[in-house]
Image: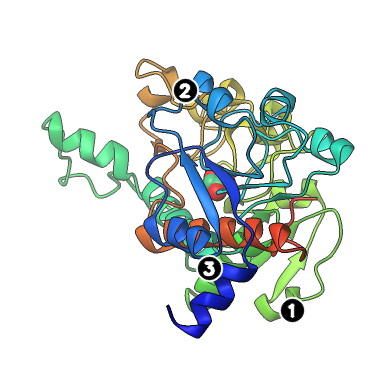
Amino acid sequence: MSTMSTVRAATAAAFKVLVSHPNVPAPALELLRSRGAETIICQSVPPCREEILQKVSGVDAIFWAHYQPLNAGILDAAGAQLRCVSTMSSGIDFADVPEFKRRQIPLGHTPGVVKNSVADLAIGLMIAAGRHFHAGRSDIESSQWKTELIDWRMGQEIRDSVIGFFGFGGISQAIAKRLQCWDVAKILYHTRTRKENDCEFKAEHVSFERLLQESDFLVVAAPLTDESRGKFDAKAFGQMKSNAVFVNVARGGLVIQSDLHEALTKGQIFAAGLDVTTPEPLPADDPILKLPNCVILPHLGTQTMKTTIEMSLLAANNILNAIEGRPMIRPAY
Ligand SMILES: O=CC(=O)O
């Protein structure tokens, strides 16, 4: 045994980590094990609550790798020795944060590392929705090519457009950064307070009303909270431009989906591109899937191998920091 590994074996106290999904990337599991963790891995896909409740008993840490409720039931089943939890997600709307605070259990998550893959996908949705990717494909399948018409499937261009962001954190800023060379007219954003670094992106902080009234493309990239839930309702869609393209890469809960359906059907707004819906999974017969001007993806924002590995390593490092007595890298509260 090398001197280094002798030291590690002598200093690393063994601790148990419940990993809630069998497909967590190997580098994260290897990192945890290299620092003394015994990993207890749930095998069911989709995750089975009973298996989690049974295996979580007595662990020191929980690596939560899916969007199922993370609440008092799980914390009780783990027991009083539980020292920390990290999700492998940016959003933590499925976690009962007040309960974590009440019990003073550190909770980590993985924002930041998701920004590039989600930003790429958001730009994809802006173009896909603005340029009729969904209806165009259906036109081909139903032999409805209308190239003889000059105004057939006219779309919205990003060039010279006002781009609005609801939320201006890492994801919105990564989109704004990409758009710097797209000749946009203006970048607007709405957050509770002005961001100090907004001049980097030549972005202007505006009221929610101005965001709605002036955006040609409106991108939602903000956490789902009590304040943001249902923010995009009939009243909001009613204030938007008829050429507006609405994109949501955050959470379905920020939108009243039936109101969005109506706005798209009535032509109150031009199109929508959604990576997130209510519910998820969306039933195959949901009316929103029938709309020609709505492009919908099954929550693929972070689904690249590079980002998934980065998320898993950040979640593992959150846990290791807490176990080793340091602050988590990305604490959720
Ligand atoms: O939606 C994805 C995430 O919260 O990481």
The quadrant the N terminus occupies is bottom left
Front-lying residue, 328 or 98: 328
- Mark 3 Cα within 10 Å, few/some/many (few <14, many 20+)? few
Determine if residue 244 is in view.
no
- Quote the CA–CA distance across marks 3 and 1: 19 Å
Q: Which residue is mark 3?
A: 160
The percent coordinates of residue 178 (x first, y second) are 50, 72
Q: Are marks 3 and 2 in contact (CB under 8 Å)?
A: no
Q: Is mark 3 within 8 Å of ligand 1?
A: no
The residue tagged 1 is 199
**Residue at the far top in the pictured view:** 285
| Residue 284 x/y as whole percent | 35, 19
Q: Is residue 260 visible?
A: yes
Q: Marks 2 and 1: which is nearer the front?
A: 2
* Residue pictured at 20% horizontal, 35% vertical: 139
Q: Which residue is mark 2?
A: 48
Q: Residue at x 36, y 58 (%)?
A: 305
Q: Earlier in the sequence, mark 3 or mark 2?
A: 2
**Separation (CA) of disc 3 from disc 2:** 49 Å
Q: Is residue 24 above or below residue 8?
A: above
Residues tagged 2 and 1 counted as in contact (Cβ below 8 A): no
Q: What SS does tag 1 mark?
A: helix
Circle 2 SS class: loop
Q: Reading the chain from its start, which is encountered first: label 2 or label 1?
A: 2
Of marks 3 and 1, which one's residue comes earlier in the chain? 3
Q: Examine the rendered structure and indicate whether residue 101 appears above or below residue 277.
A: below
Image depth: mark 3 or mark 1 in front: 1
Q: Residues within 10 Å of mark 2 (few under 14, many from 20)?
A: some
| Residue type of the residue flagged with mark 1 | Cys
Q: Secondary structure at mark 3?
A: loop
Q: Is mark 2 within 8 Å of ligand 1?
A: no
- Residue 280 in the image, given as x and y percentages of width and height: 48, 27
